[in-house]
Image (tube, helix red, strand yellow):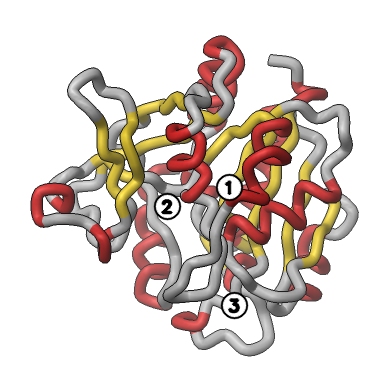
Amino acid sequence: MDKNKLGAIVLAAGKGKRMNSRDVNKVVLPLANKPMIVHSIALLENVGISQIVVVVGFAKKSVMEVLGTKVMFAEQHKRLGTGHAVVQGLRKMPNEVENILVINGDDSAFYTEEVIKNLAEKHLISNASLTFLTIDKQNPFGLGRVIRDENENVKAIVEEKDATDMQRKVTEVNPGCYIFKSSFLRKYLPRVKKSPVTGEYYLTSLIDIGIKNNEKTETLKAGPLPWRGVNTKDELLEAERLFISTK
């Protein structure tokens, strides 16, 4: 893996409404006595990724003060979704970076160095345009299901609210960990359409766009990886228990 040609964008701009946090971004709330995002940045550094852009927005100072000069920052002035956030991050990424890992600042502490290295290796060896991580969850409620065809190729990511009863039984889900060719992002991010419901641009739309345009799409199945997205205070407590139990 050519570490100089792999960068990372960490999404940390969201308001996290359900956390009821007014002064700090949820990514700086403590997980095992450290801000969540500090675990994520340490993971990237341990893997050998040095070109890291953190996209900030809500309570940006709380994130910037925690990370200091370790990373570059991009600001998402209007919170218009994950796809829009990556556009901001991409503008700050050095041109020599050929592949970009995109993760969330509030759940990526659960990934291991081995998982990220394996994801990058599969992406590079297969020469894919995009490669994303999948995990198995016994209770996948609220998460996007990975729908495959009879040949195990990814057909789509279907969100909970859009899924049929049969699709909701699928336990393979998308936790939001991707590697894209930089050229793919620059070509297709402008094609992501705004959701008529929320007015946001979703990064998951790139998977559908890539498949429809015959861009090579790969996945790395991580199986029942311990993982917990954090959107509420109860989920943060659950994440704390899960994180400590895995260390």
Q: Amino acid at mark 1?
A: Ile
Q: Residue 202 location in percent, x, y?
A: 52, 58
Q: Please give the residue where the numbered disc 1 appears in the rendered image.
A: 103
Numbered label attached to residue 132: none
Relative vertical location of residue 186 with respect to residue 239 in this rendering, above or below = above
Residue that label 2 marks: 244
Disc 1 to disc 3, how far (Cα)? 17 Å
Secondary structure under badge 1?
Answer: strand
- Label 2's element? helix
1 or 2: tag closer to the N-terminus = 1
Q: Nearer the viewer, mark 1 or mark 2?
A: 1
**Residue bearing the label numbered 3:** 15
Task: Give neighbour class at mark 2: few <14, some 14-19, many 20+ (Cα, 10 Å).
Answer: few
Residue drawn 58% across and 72% down? Answer: 26
Spatial CA distance of label 1 from label 2 is: 21 Å
Q: Is residue 32 visible?
A: no
- Crowd tier of the residue under label 3, counting other residues whose Cα lies within 10 Å: few below 14, some 14–19, many 20 or above: some
Residue occupying the point 72% across, 33% down = 182
Sequence-wise, which precedes: disc 3 or disc 2?
Answer: 3
**x and y percentages locating residue 79 in the rendered image:** 64, 73
Q: Quadrant of the C terminus?
A: top left
Q: Is residue 243 above or below residue 113?
A: below
Residue at horizontal 62 percent and vertical 33 percent from the top: 180
Tell me the quarter of the picture where residue 93 sits: top right
The reply to whether callout 1 and callout 3 are in contact (CB within 8 Å) is no
Q: Amino acid at mark 3?
A: Lys
Relative side of 69 to 56, left or right:
right
- The amino acid on which the numbered mark 2 sits, given as a three-letter code, is Ile
Query: Quadrant location of the N terminus?
Result: top right
